[in-house]
Amino acid sequence: MLNSRPRTQLARNTAWMITGQGMRLVIQAAYFIEIARSLGVSNYGAFVGVVALVGVVYPFASLGGGNLLVKNVARDPSLFAACWGRALTLTACFGAILFLAVCTLSHFVLPPAIPRLLVAMVAAADIFGLSVITLSSQAFQAFERLRWTATLHVMMSGGRLAGALILIAIQPHPSALLWSYLYFGSTAVVAVVSCIFVSKQLGLPKFSWPQSAAEMREGFYFSASQTSQTVYNDIDKTMLARLSTLEATGIYGAAYRIIDVSFVPVSALLWSSYPSFFRAGSRGISASLSYAKPLLLRALIYAGVVCLALLLAAGIVPRILGPEYRSTAEALRWLSVLPVLKATHYFLSDTLTGAGHQGLRTCLQAGVAVFNVLLNMWIIPAYSWRGAAWSSIASDGALALSVAVAVWLLNRRSHATAIDSAPTVVGPGLPDALQLSSVISVGEE
């Protein structure tokens, strides 16, 4: 148990995040329904394919600056101004490079039917705007002021819903390109407002470059980890657009979106507990795992209920989105197990990160990302969106298993090291069994 942070604070922060995420959930549901219905399955598939491509490189825009901010400020709040400034500096520099890279890469990985201006608008919105919004959210997260983090999340979703409603009022059936203009504009407005909030509530940034190669390397690990996560979560949508059809992309993208929405309460708990993982992890993997266990149990109970609900209620989806999305019900039933798998590997992965094993976490995630891409290259041409669904289940399952094994081995090694290094001073004449018990007790302390 963390003495410096009572459980009531975690509960309060989680409540704020669930409230904010709940409001965001309602907004996103309205946004998703309006966009999916107005764009149609082909245009929606094109938009989803572009967003997935941008999402692969987006985490490198800040080179892990937001995660480093949370880690450093959670342990020493006086470092905020420098960490906030470095994160913004990295985003401006690396974001420009990534924007050009995405626009170039899109010529090779996306079908010609998708306009390149659509790629540019989405890339600018996410690489610059969404990165700044995420950094602002992490700034409040570092101070465990999750009320403001939740507020920014609601603002981001609310801005996009407002943009969607304005567009549909003007053009009931817009193209994906036309929607991308509103997508960029709404994201840019929220990004500016987010920076103002952080500056007023927490302080102005001190702009500087990262101070050491070690910090850059750790930031790279954080970014590579997030990119790997995006690959095994979202690259299948881009590959569907390229290797199958835009209709298949729209069907699968709609089902996966519902999975993301159902995972919101677990995401809220992950956001609330993230700074505490760094504080617990400063005492080793055992302390980090002890902190994670009760949280993981609650998440798994919720995820199990969600899995059952999705299996039973999937048939409602086509009635809401329209008959052209009728296959989404089948896709949703296939994907219903994902919340359980995701809850498992997210909490155990944060256990590794908090204890200073971000490099190991990144390697495991990168390995699963490569596995996902290779599997999709074979299975999508043969089975379309069904192949993408099977690949997602296999990838999340493989990650959950590999992270669990890594945490178990590290924890076992930690206990063995503690026992080996413990003093064995015991009184004369004590039985061997009592001497061994004394050694183990010292090791566990």
Image (tube, rainbow, N blue to C red):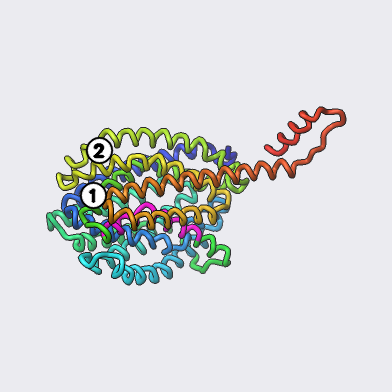
> Which residue corresponds to the image point at 51% horizontal and 57% vertical from the top-left?
68
Predominant secondary structure in magenta? helix
Residue 314: which numbered mark, if any?
2
Where residue 358 sits: x, y (%)? 53, 54
* Residue 144 visible to the viewer: yes
- Whether residue 69 appears in this view of the structure is no
Location of residue 232 with respect to 22 vertically, above or below: below
Q: CB under 8 Å between callouts 2 and 1?
A: no
Q: Residues within 10 Å of mark 2 (few under 14, many from 20)?
A: some
Looking at the rendered structure, the secondary structure element under dot 1 is helix
**Span highlighted in magenta in the image:** 221-241
- The image shows residue 344 at horizontal and vertical percentages of 45, 41
Q: Residue at x 42, y 55 (%)?
A: 371
Residue 428 location (% of width, % of height)? 87, 31
Image-based side of 64 in relation to 310, left or right: right
At label 2, the amino acid type is Ala
Does the magenta portion include 126? no
| Disc 1 residue type (three-letter) | Ile
Q: Circle 1 is placed at which residue position? A: 251
The quarter of the picture where the C terminus appears is: top right
Q: Earlier in the sequence, mark 2 or mark 1?
A: 1
Left or right: 246 as drawn, with respect to 387: left
Q: Residue at left 31%, top 70%?
A: 103
Q: Label 2 vs label 1: CA separation?
A: 13 Å
Total labels drawn = 2
In percent of width and height, residue 154 lies at 32, 48
Q: Is residue 46 above or below residue 294?
A: below
Q: Quadrant of the N terminus?
A: top right
How many C-alpha atoms fall within 10 Å of the one at disc 1: few (<14), some, or many (≥20)?
Answer: many
Where disc 2 sits, the SS reads helix
